[in-house]
Image (spheres, grey):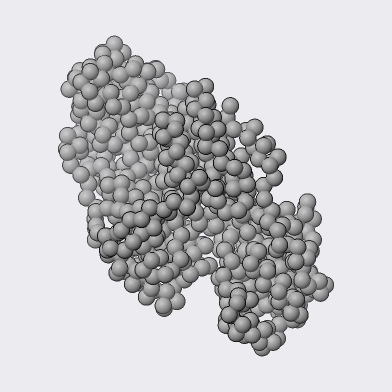
Amino acid sequence: MRIGMLTGGGDCPGLNPAIRGFVMRALDYGYECVGFLNGWKGLVEGASRPLGLKDVEDIIAQGGTMLGSSRTNPFRAGREHELESCLANIKKFDLDAVVALGGEDTLGVAYKLFKLGINTVGVPKTMDNDLNSTDYTFGFDSAVSVATDSIDRLRDTAKSHNRVMVVEVMGRHAGWVALYAGIAGGADWILLPEIGLDIDAMCEHLTAIRARGKNYGIVVASEGVDLPHSDETDVAVDAFGHVILRERGVGDFLAKEIEQRTGIETRFAVLGHIQRGGAPTVFDRVLASRLGIKAAELVHNKEFGKMASIQGNQITGVDLEHAVTQLKTVPPEFYEEATTLFSK
Amino acid sequence: MNRIGVLTSGGDAPGMNAAIRAVVRAGIAKGLEVIGIERGYHGLLNGNVRPMTAGSVSGIIQLGGTMIRTARSEEFKTAEGQARAAEVIKREGIEGLAVIGGDGSFRGALAINRACGVHVAGIPATIDNDIPGTQYSIGFDTAINTALDAIDKIRDTSASHDRVFVVEVMGRHNGFIALEVGIAGGAEAVLVPECRCDMIGLCQRIQAGQARGKMSSIIIVAEGASRGSDVAATITQITGIETRLSILGHIQRGGTPSARDRALATRFGYRAVELLMEGETNFMVGIEKNQIIHSPIERVTEGRRDLDSSLLDIVEVMAT
């Protein structure tokens, strides 16, 4: 059997261990693996590389993905020729199955191909941890570790200067990264997209803990927090006469608001893609390896249209269809728990 | 000399604790009493002082920040504030004062010396590394390694997408951090306050790079050169390529100090105490060619350290 493999969408730590886990299991079965480069684009263009033991044996500690990634979607309207070449290449490369590692979009394509009769299997990946039908996705633990490390650094300097520090972390629609990094980093306030922004309550709290004697404060906010004037952009012109749209980020906005309302010196940091890189943590390496193994087993058992998933501590296969339709957000009671830990 | 004081002032830097420890332990070993002054000159004029023991600085060499905290004091800039500080110095019997900080802190040291004659020693600590009279200041090595670590993480992810990554690092008035991490991190370009950046030329290079198959580019921006968000927006506007922004901010100020910073801080603190005991005043310790030196503090507060802009050429050559 020949199996094609690709990674799509935004990358995250754990993709390489997952590729490795898959190939190791496929080798047990005596299957041949072919890697397609840069997501679905590789299958459309027929850009491939062999995936043998030698190719994967050194990659467990590496962030990113050895196969590259892209956001190419062969099902996009007007891209029918891409879908045709994709299907043609599956024939040309004589693939018995295609395994896709990715988030919502990548797995969505895998599901649509499955409906067209292609043998596909999915492996979930997103550092946002917002995929339904799996308890955790790899990349999340690594991202939260990076964010927590940054908060630890900010605490050092916040204490020296009696300041409030605002940290903007990833999470457009779900606040998992902010919630976990906030709890682990000992935040005094956490802001998530799921919870309405109450600037007054936050500022009162920061003022109260200062009055009680805590000389610094830490606020962790998801990039997707709904700002009161988030559509506001001011237009400026740069040195070359080009119009620049100055987008106000969450961190910047909150730092200014806090300083204005409380009079406490406040600074901010925006972590951005730092959270997507770096060596995967132990948790992510183990989870990714197990999901990779499971994907190979799903192929072996001809359970197509499925995705490897972790539920409790069990690795299982679930329907791709259900995995990609709904977002997993932070439940209000979990946030409530976190607020107990805000300094009093 | 019987009694010396130590304070940290201005922006904090990783390694300040190692310097405090060195001043306290060297002082005590040489038979002095050492007084810790809280929150810089602000604490000095308010009399926030406490005696330090060898044990009081145990377990701090590896900690970021400063155990005696720091502050910027407006009051100390006034004659009245300085008179109050002088009173505290006299009352506490402080004959020598070790000031750990940057050029603003050293101007304060000169003022307090003028006000009451106390001998003052400057120990350069600033992540910006912009103090003349020393090749390295405490905190710079840690800050560039923190920034480099962030860039390496972005590098992992950038090999996976066709994108431009803009990383804003600290450096309001100079590009020492930006340039060093730009070279070490393999950046496509480094934007520093000292030099004008040809954005159109940069965009052409990015496009040419992508045309020949380069996956992604990392642009380092010193905060004083431009806002990172403006650079990102301009690149997108000219090239149409997606850009992503990270603003490291004060993350670079924190964290456990590197081996170099700890060793440097310890050597600085030790030498500062020696020189104070020899009767020296109005000096700053520094390092040149791995030798601890000292120079008149006036030269430090009046001069400036220039960026070696030829290093920008190295960045450009390495990016091709």
Question: Observer-nearest residue: A174 or A69?
Answer: A174
> In the picture, residue B47 is in which quadrant?
top left
Residue at 57% in and 54% down: A172
> In the picture, residue A77 is in which quadrant?
bottom right
Residue at 52% in and 33% down: A200
- The image shows a total of numbered marks equal to 0
Residue at 32% in and 20% down: B44
Give above or below for B131 relative to A313. Answer: above
> In the picture, residue B71 is in which quadrant?
top left
Q: For this view, does A244 lie left or right of residue A334? A: left
Q: Position of residue B191 (x, y in %)?
A: 31, 58
Q: Position of residue B200 (x, y in %)?
A: 30, 68
Q: Quadrant of the C terminus of chain A?
A: top right
Give above or below for A68 relative to B280. Answer: below
Q: Position of residue A7 (x, y in %)?
A: 62, 69
Give above or below for B237 relative to A32. Answer: above
